[in-house]
Amino acid sequence: MNWLLVVAGAVVGAPLRYLTDRFVQARHDSVFPWGTFVVNAGACLVLGVLTGAVLAGAGSSRLALLLGTGLCGALSTYSTFSYETLRLAERGWKFLAAANAAASVLVGLGAVTLGSQVAGQLFA
């Protein structure tokens, strides 16, 4: 029955990704994929907090399945990030493509680290 937790999280995460992406992107007059950047960073932050909470004993493995695998898995999108980065490069915006790749990795790592540390402090 664990798969139902993953499905339940994904049912919320996938539409949340789409709606957040459209909301953010509509507010930027730019070719940079801000919507995908924001949802991926947000998912990393949520996953960091969740992981920190679980490691501190304040969260269960079932919660990790629901929010980590389900919600964050559907909220974040490596395939769209890769596609949008490739499209930037193909259209001649090589600097933006490189910036998207570098910033996405750095911000994602920073967000998951920050989230984990905050949860560790809150639940220690």
Image (spheres, rainbow, N blue to C red):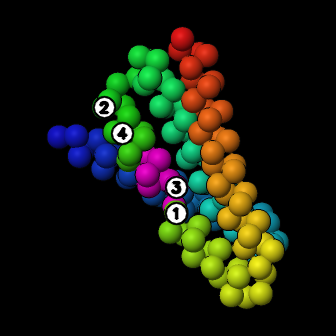
Hey, what amino acid is under mark 2? Arg
Hey, what amino acid is under mark 1? Tyr
Q: Are marks 1 and 4 in contact (CB under 8 Å)?
A: no
The residue where tag 1 is placed is 78
Does residue 26 appear left or right of residue 79 in this picture? right
Q: Position of residue 61 (x, y in %)?
A: 32, 30
Q: Earlier in the sequence, mark 1 or mark 4?
A: 4
Q: Which residues are magenta?
A: 71-77
Query: Split into 4 quadrants, where in the image is the C terminus?
Result: top right
Does residue 17 appear left or right of residue 31 in this picture? left
Hey, what amino acid is under mark 4? Leu
Res 26 → quadrant: bottom right
Q: CA distance from mark 4 to mark 3?
A: 14 Å
- Looking at the rendered structure, which numbered label has been put on residue 76? 3
Q: Earlier in the sequence, mark 3 or mark 2?
A: 2
The residue where tag 4 is placed is 66
Q: Which one is in front, 36 or 112?
A: 112
Question: Helix or strand or loop: what does disc 1 sit on?
Answer: helix
Q: Position of residue 113 (x, y in %)?
A: 62, 35
